[in-house]
Image (cartoon, helix red, strand yellow):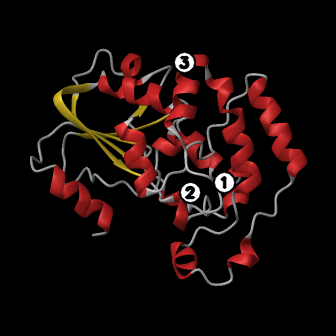
Amino acid sequence: MDDREIFVKNIIKDKNSRILEIGPLNRPIVLKSEYRNSYYCDIRNTDEIKELYSGNEYLEKTGICIDINSIVDVDFVIKESYQKTFSHIEKFDYVIASHVIEHMDDIIGFFVDISGILKPGGKLCIIYPDKRYCFDHFRESSSFRDAFDVFTRGRTETARMVLDFFSMSVNENNPVVFWNGDNLNNIIPQYNIEQSIENYKCVLNGEKFDDVHYWPFTDRSFLLFMYN
């Protein structure tokens, strides 16, 4: 049992709770063998997820490697929004989002959307990567200001976050490396600024990048974000 499972077990006491886990990929926290009313969802179906993790710019940029044979089957594919996808389905006691919110281009819109599929008193449980100990190490923490700008003015406002991701992320995702702080000069961003700017322009023209970290946080910056 890893720390994520302990986290969930400390929150979800009733094994009969209705639970939705978003984007479990190959490491679901909520195991169907333990929680019989649990479901998995993603913005892609299982075959599309496996195809995506066979290789793309995001994986190359971050150094992440996933065994596609370990990817679990999803029960629901999100279409347009969570509320529309689950409009005819009983609401959930818990929604689990592990390493998900940083990928949401409109993070405030995501919170609003999720609130509509939770029962009264339901909980959204979040686990996210602390940017200090992953490939976002050299990036600035996200602000409520930027998130509210995206929520109010539209997703093309994420262009600067896409530019930041492609220009400042590094090909190292081992938290021990960043914790020890040894030889960080060897992994400073070696970016292709021309391609980073091209991706920035693509967002301004309406293209959406699903597999970037729009919102890097530290623990402290996330608490401040949620306070706002």
Q: What is the quadrant of residue 73 in the picture?
A: top left
Question: Could you tell me if residue 56 is visible in this image?
Answer: no
Residue 105 x, y percent position in the rendering:
57, 33
Residue 34 x, y percent position in the rendering:
18, 54
Q: What residue is disc 1 on?
A: 54
Q: What is the quadrant of residue 41 in the picture?
A: top left
- Identify the element where label 1 is drawn: loop
Q: Which amino acid does label 2 sit on?
A: Ile
What residue is at 77 percent from the left and 52 percent from the top? 167
Q: Which residue is at the front of the view, 110 or 15?
A: 110
**Mark closer to the chain start, 3 or 2:** 2
Q: Distance between the residues labelled 3 and 2?
A: 37 Å
For the N terminus, the image quarter is bottom left
Label placed on residue 68: 2
What residue is at 66 percent from the left and 40 percent from the top? 161
Q: Which amino acid does label 3 sit on?
A: Thr
**Mark closer to the chain start, 1 or 2:** 1
Q: Crowdedness of circle 3 by 10 Å Cα count: few (<14), some, many (20+)?
A: few
- Identify the element where label 2 is drawn: helix
Callouts 1 and 2 close, C-beta under 8 Å = yes
Q: What residue is disc 3 on?
A: 152
Q: Crowdedness of circle 2 by 10 Å Cα count: few (<14), some, many (20+)?
A: some
**Mark closer to the chain start, 3 or 1:** 1
Tell whether 76 sits left or right of 4.
right
Instruction: Answer above or below: position of 110 versus 166.
Output: above
Q: What residue type is labelled 1?
A: Ser
Instruction: Answer above or below: position of 165 versus 69.
Output: above
Question: Could you tell me if residue 102 is visible in this image?
Answer: yes
Residue occupying the far right of the picture: 194
Q: Distance between the residues labelled 3 and 1?
A: 35 Å
